Image: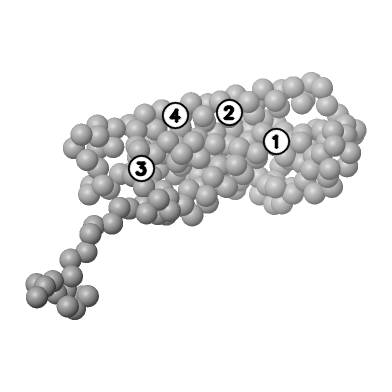
Amino acid sequence: MSDAPSDPAERPTEPTAPSATAPARTRRQRFTRWAPLITAVIAIATIAADQLSKLWAEAALSTSERIPLLGDLLGLQLIYNPGAAFSIGEQYTWIFAVLAGLAAVAVGVIAYRTRSLPWSVAWGLLLGGAVTHLADRLFREPGFGIGHVVDFIAYGNWFIGNIADVAIFAGAVLLLVLSFLGLRMRPSAAAASPGDEDATRA
């Protein structure tokens, strides 16, 4: 007579290997203590690209003529924008200067504490866009705190923007994607292993 248990619930089960189709968010993240430096490099590159492109736009483009690049969908035309996107709030230029300054400080503080490479890229794009917009408000005509932003990338008949706008949009989209994927900005105490120097060092 067999000694094996007759009830299937009592029978021992073999351990199963992790499924190859497990959600990506369960995989172990890698972190680096160089993330704040990466943010700074991307921010500086964004600021340089934005300001240099504005110098070119002021020298090469006209406020009265649009140069088509993709028909009516995309073109180049110089404008000086005292407001936000779509020239909203033209009479409140100083408010946008304050908001840009607050955004730069907030993003800088968060980025300094970030240890994730993808998050550091997103923060760098947002930080660079905020700082270069702030510089326009502070140092361009007609005066300190009320400077007009140089825009020159014309999107159809909707609005005219610049490189900083592109960086801010890309950074915001990347933030949404990273949040949707469930990726963390910093390692949790439980997830950080003693042997992982980059993951455990804050």
- The residue where tag 2 is placed is 47
- The residue where tag 1 is placed is 162
Near mark 2 (Cα within 10 A), the count class, few <14, some 14-19 or many ≥20, is: many
Spatial distance from mark 3 to mark 1, Cα to Cα? 34 Å
Q: Of the residues shown, which amino acid type is indicated by label 3?
A: Gln
Q: Residue 56: where, in percent of width, then height?
A: 74, 22
SS for callout 1 = loop
Spatial distance from mark 3 to mark 2, Cα to Cα? 30 Å
Along the line of sight, which residue is nearer the eye, 161 or 36?
36
Quarter of the image where one finds residue 120: top left
Spatial distance from mark 4 to mark 3, Cα to Cα? 17 Å
SS for callout 2 = helix
Q: Choose mark 4 or mark 3, whichever is in front.
A: 3
* Residue for point 63% across, 33% down: 136
Q: Residue 116: where, in percent of width, then height?
A: 39, 39
Label 3 vs 2, first from the N-terminus: 3
- The residue where tag 4 is placed is 38
Q: Choose mark 2 or mark 4, whichever is in front.
A: 4
Q: Of the residues shown, which amino acid type is indicated by label 1?
A: Asn
Q: What number is the disc on residue 23?
A: none
Question: 188 above or below 144?
Answer: below
